Amino acid sequence: MAKIKIIIILAFLCIGLHKSYSQTYNFKTSGFSVLEKDQKGKWGKWSDLDLVNILVKLDTDKSRIIVYSEAIQVFEIIDYHPIEENESDCVYSFTCKDNNGDDCMLSIITRKKQDNRKQLYINYDNRIIVYNISNFKS
């Protein structure tokens, strides 16, 4: 009986420690823009920046990124890429699948030479969506 109690206590401790190491990052957006390919497969021009104030959540415990736009976008993280860093940018990239099962690449970019401005890029084969983001404490 004592062994069972010890096992149960250890199980609760392990679960509690596991939860404490999971990371959730919250961001809020201030604007977004879209770039699309035309009929000939050439990139067009960026759309005008639309002002939006929505929540973006990176949940490493559940391996997903959620953009709480009018139509909620859920991206399942398939692969975490190594950080790429140079003089002007720090890039965290993720290979993902969206709600529809389409492959895409999400990147959170910190622009070092622009007062550490952050952007979220959602890259598909035929379009790119960019959100200006900032850290948000809920």
Image (cartoon, grey):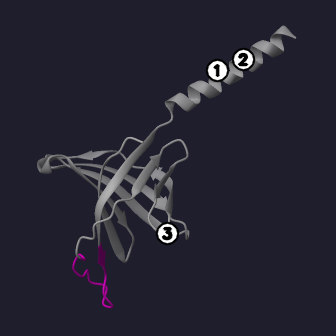
Which residue lies under the disc numbered 2? 9
Q: In the image, residue 74 lies at what x, y percent?
A: 51, 60
Quarter of the image for the C terminus: give it.
top left
Q: Nearer the viewer, mark 1 or mark 3?
A: 3
Asked whether the residues under the numbered discs 1 and 2 touch, taking CB atoms below 8 Å apart as contact, a structural biologist would say yes
Q: In the image, residue 109 lies at what x, y percent?
A: 27, 52
Disc 3, SS: loop
Whichever of callouts 1 and 3 sits on the residue coming sooner in the sequence is 1
Q: In the image, residue 22 lies at what x, y percent?
A: 51, 35
The outermost residue toward the top is: 2
Q: In the image, residue 105 lies at what x, y percent?
A: 40, 61
Question: How far is the residue under mark 1 from the one under mark 2?
Answer: 6 Å
Q: Please, is residue 4 above or below residue 19 in the view?
A: above
Identity, as a three-letter code, of the amino acid under mark 3: Ala
Residue 106 part of the magenta-drawn span: no
Residue at (40% x, 46% y) in the render: 26
Identity, as a three-letter code, of the amino acid under mark 1: Leu
Magenta residues, dominant SS class: loop
Identity, as a three-letter code, of the amino acid under mark 2: Ile
Residue at (57% x, 25% y) in the render: 17
Quarter of the image for the N terminus: give it.
top right
Q: Residue 13 bears which disc, if any? A: 1
Question: How far is the residue under mark 3 from the one under mark 2?
Answer: 42 Å
Foreground of the two, 69 or 63: 69
Disc 1, SS: helix
Give the residues drawn in magenta, as a range.
34-47
Asked whether the residues under the numbered discs 1 and 3 touch, taking CB atoms below 8 Å apart as contact, a structural biologist would say no
Disc 2, SS: helix
Which residue lies under the disc numbered 3? 71
Whichever of callouts 3 and 2 sits on the residue coming sooner in the sequence is 2
